[in-house]
Image (spheres, grey):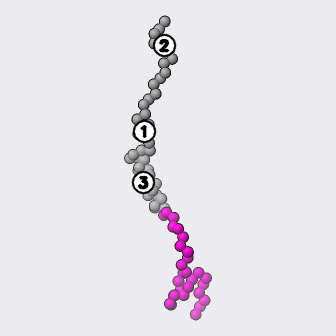
Amino acid sequence: MPKVPDGYVRVRSYIRRKPGPKSAKGLSVWAVAGLCAVVWLWGQIFGFGDSDAEQQPAPKPAVSAPAGGQ
């Protein structure tokens, strides 16, 4: 029998890669693109606080001269 390379194990009649330690999988590229699309659509539909700025009353100018003229 030939020697099994490092990182592999013989299972019955074939050579199989040894399972490595489970690592935390990150988000795939498509998942990140989907999240970006959701945030963009949310901003297009509901806006990011634009409605709050429209509801604030406009400041009134201060009176600098008396109303009665001389």
Q: Secondary structure at mark 3?
A: helix
Q: Mark 3 or mark 1: which comes first in sequence?
A: 3
Tell me where residue 6 appears, x and y as whole percent: 61, 82
What kind of secondary structure does the magenta stretch mostly adopt? loop
Density class for disc 1 (Cα within 10 Å; few <14, some 14-19, many ≥20) is few
Total residue callouts: 3
Q: Which mark is residue 52?
A: 1
* Pair 3/2: label in front: 2
Tell me where residue 38 appears, x and y as whole percent: 42, 54
In the rendered image, the vertical position of residue 66 relative to residue 16, given as above or below: above
Q: Is residue 29 magenta?
A: no
User: Whole-Å distance between the Cαs marked 1 and 2?
Assistant: 35 Å
Range of residues picked out in magenta: 1-28
User: In this rendering, would 6 be left or right of 51?
Assistant: right
* Pair 3/1: label in front: 1
The residue type indicated by label 3 comes to Val
Quadrant of the rendered image containing residue 56: top left
Assess whether mark 2 and mark 1 are in contact (beta carbons under 8 angstroms): no
Residue for badge 2 = 66
> Which residue of the protein is positioned furthest toward the bottom in this rendering?
1
In the rendered image, the vertical position of residue 2 relative to residue 31, given as above or below: below
Q: Mark 1 or mark 2: which comes first in sequence?
A: 1
Q: Secondary structure at mark 1?
A: helix
**4 vs 65, nearest the viewer:** 65
> Which residue of the protein is positioned furthest toward the left in this rendering?
45
Q: Which mark is residue 38?
A: 3
Q: Mark 3 or mark 2: which comes first in sequence?
A: 3
